[in-house]
Image (cartoon, grey):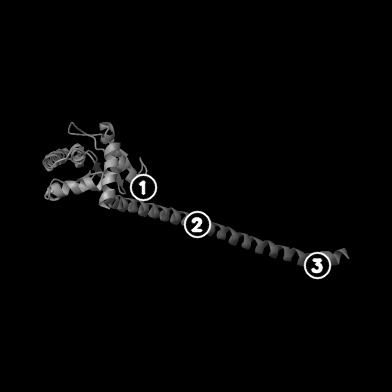
Amino acid sequence: DQRMLRQETQHLVQALRNPAARGRWGEMQLQRALEMIGMIEGTHYLQQQTAIDDGVRRQPDFIIRMPGDMQIIVDVKTPVEPYWEALEKAETEGARDAALGTFKKNVREHLKTLSSKEYWRAFDTPEFVVMFMPTEGLYSMAVSNDPALIEDAARSNIILASPTTLMGLLRVVMHGWQQQKMAEEAKTVATLACDLYNRIATFGEHMQKLGRNLSTAVGAYDDAVGSLEKSGLPGAR
């Protein structure tokens, strides 16, 4: 298993040698996760939305929409270059330790920058931001190389998320959307049922009126026939 994981990592490293591809990688991984859950852009999530608060421009990478107009901000700009360097160039233990040290420093700096943006001031979101790390290996390296990272991130209103943990969060959000859709459909059915009941009640009133009119008509008919038989026909005979 370790050999296969190492081979897959090497293949991924080779595929992402292009800096532009690396920059887009986190974004593509997150969008893939959203699509796997069944989320639709524009309905369940938004990209690169801008808001101005006290003259400060804020533009998060992704906004996950929740029922009730709440939102979750997701950042995908976790610095990954030192991570790739640790995988690609660390031929010696010293080189690897240096790459890991740079990686730890960059993650901490990004954490501080992300916390200072305070997205919740401009968006209708809880006071936290999800910092997405696009592979389990990247997440594992970050938390194992810096044991206090998760706790310090939480104190800074940042939630670290690997693909697995993010998928769990997205499933909970999608379940909320499904429950809201069911509630809306139930409300629609109830409205239609009430309208149908009123229509049937009105139809019943018309039938009762028709019955009374028919009864009156039959009575008049019987009276007319009786009068004809008693007085009209004897005279005619």
The relative height of residue 127 versus residue 213 in the rendered view (above or below) is above
Q: Is residue 202 above or below residue 108?
A: below
SS at mark 1 in the image: helix
Structural distance between the alpha carbons of marks 1 and 2: 44 Å
Classed neighbour count for the residue bearing mark 3: other residues with Cα under 10 Å, few (<14), some (14–19), many (≥20): few
Q: Is residue 230 left or right of residue 170?
A: right
Inspect this view and state whether residue 2 appears.
yes
**Residue 101 location (% of width, % of height):** 11, 41
Residue 229: assigned label:
3
Q: Which residue is mark 2?
A: 198
Q: Nearer the viewer, mark 1 or mark 2?
A: 1
Q: Residue 102 placed where, x, y %? A: 13, 39
Q: Which image quadrant for residue 27?
A: top left
Q: In the rendered structure, which amino acid carries the disc numbered 3? A: Glu
Label 1 belongs to which residue?
Answer: 36
Q: Position of residue 161 (x, y in %)?
A: 23, 48
Residue at 58% across, 58% down: 206
